[in-house]
Structure formats: C-alpha cells, structure tokens
Image (cartoon, grey):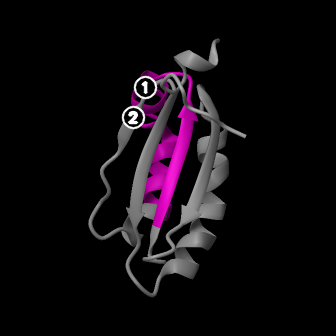
Amino acid sequence: MSPDSRIVESVVLPVRPGFEGSFEAAFATAEPLIMRADGYISHTLRRGIENPATYLLSVEWESVEAHEQGFRGSDDYREWTLLLHHFYEPLPQVLHYGAPMQGSATS
C-alpha cells in the first residue's frame, strides 16, 4: 500500500478538567485495542499546551473503512468507548484527512 493511499483520523479530545491523569491512565489501557485493529498503522496522542484538558489524537489508517466499519464495528471499540468516552465533554468530532498535499514536508 502506498503512503499516499493512507488516511489520518484527527480528533480533539475535550477531557473534563481535573480528569487528565485518569484519562491518560485509561488511554494507556485502551491503546492496545486500537493498535490491534485491522487497517491500523500508527497513532499519536498529544496534550494541549494552551488548554491542558484537551488532547489531539491522530491515527493513521489504511482507509476510512478500516476505521469506520472495521474498528468502530468491533468489540474492541465497544471496550474503547467504555474506557474513554465518559471523560469527554462534549463528545468530540472525528474527521478524516487524505494524503499529504504537494509541498508538505516531514523530518
């Protein structure tokens, strides 16, 4: 599969203030659930600087379907939601992005 055919799921996670430590511990427990999903490639979780109660989750997938029908249709996703979704206020919007545009650089 070409890197240009991969997609990135991007979501800002608005964690209820005061629950950041509990969220991070729950995320560490939940990570293996997403990492073993068919079509999963990689992910990063970054904590907000201006607002430490927000996190940016980026997940690279082979396709939107791998995320939407594969992972989200799995028992692992049901466990993921039980572990994590009660931390969010409000529930986050999930967006998908395509291949890097011409002129994009990485190091």
Give the position of the C terminus as an image quadrant.
top right
Whole-percent x and y of residue 88? Answer: 36, 68
Distance in Å between CA atoms under marks 2 and 1: 7 Å
- Report the residue that reaches farthest toward the right: 107
Residues packed near mark 1 inside 10 Å, few (<14), some (14 to 19) or many (20 plus): some
Give the position of the N terminus as an image quadrant.
top right
Residues packed near mark 2 inside 10 Å, few (<14), some (14 to 19) or many (20 plus): some
Whole-percent x and y of residue 63? Answer: 49, 22
Was residue 13 drawn as part of the magenta stretch in this picture? no
Q: Which residue is mark 2?
A: 96
Q: Which residue is mark 1?
A: 64
Q: Residue type at mark 2? A: His
Sooner in the amino-acid sequence: mark 2 or mark 1? 1
Q: Quadrant of residue 104?
A: top right
Q: Residue type at mark 1? A: Val
Between marks 2 and 1 in the image, the one whose residue lies nearer the viewer: 2
Q: Quadrant of residue 41?
A: top right
Query: Which residue is drawn at the image coordinates 45% and 76% (left, top)?
Result: 50
Which of 81 and 24 lies nearest the eye of the viewer?
Answer: 24
Quick check: marks 2 and 1 in contact, CB under 8 Å? yes
Q: Which portion, as a residue range, is magenta?
A: 55-83
Query: Which residue is drawn at the image coordinates 58% and 57% (left, top)?
Result: 45
